[in-house]
Image: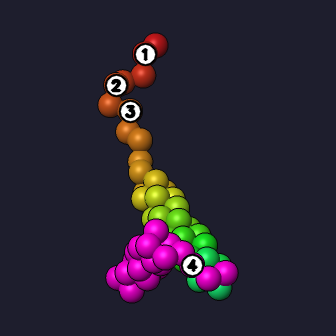
Amino acid sequence: MITKELIERINQLSRQSREQGLTPEEKTEQDQLRRQYVEAIKARVKDTLSRVEFVDELPPQH
């Protein structure tokens, strides 16, 4: 699940990476958080697409 805290921590690590760099532990955390974020987005997209229903409004042609 994407929480406000997750996004804030990803952004904090991103800023820190640009400004002063990350320790190996922080880089690992950043990678894990980014993967978690991407997986949550994928799950949302899959859920949305699973609810899509195509409707053929044209009558079948004989």
Q: Which residues are magenta?
A: 1-24
Give the Cα separation between the discs numbered 1 and 3.
12 Å
Give the Cα separation between the discs numbered 4 and 3.
53 Å
Q: Residues within 10 Å of mark 4 (few under 14, many from 20)?
A: some
Q: Which residue is mark 4?
A: 22
- Looking at the picture, does residue 42 appear above or below residue 17? above
Q: Residues within 10 Å of mark 3 (few under 14, many from 20)?
A: few
Counting residues from the N terminus, which is met first, the one under dot 4 or under dot 3? Answer: 4
Q: Amino acid at mark 3?
A: Asp
| Residue nearest the viewer, comparing 13 with 33 | 13
| Residue nearest the viewer, comparing 42 with 18 | 18
Q: Residue at x 57, y 78 (%)?
A: 22
Q: Which residue is mark 1?
A: 61
Q: Position of residue 57 (x, y in %)?
A: 32, 31
Q: Residues within 10 Å of mark 2 (few under 14, many from 20)?
A: few
Counting residues from the N terminus, which is met first, the one under dot 1 or under dot 4? Answer: 4
Res 56 label: 3
Q: Residue at x 62, y 82 (%)?
A: 23
Q: Position of residue 58 (x, y in %)?
A: 34, 25
Q: Secondary structure at mark 4?
A: loop
Identity of the residue furthest to the top in this view: 62
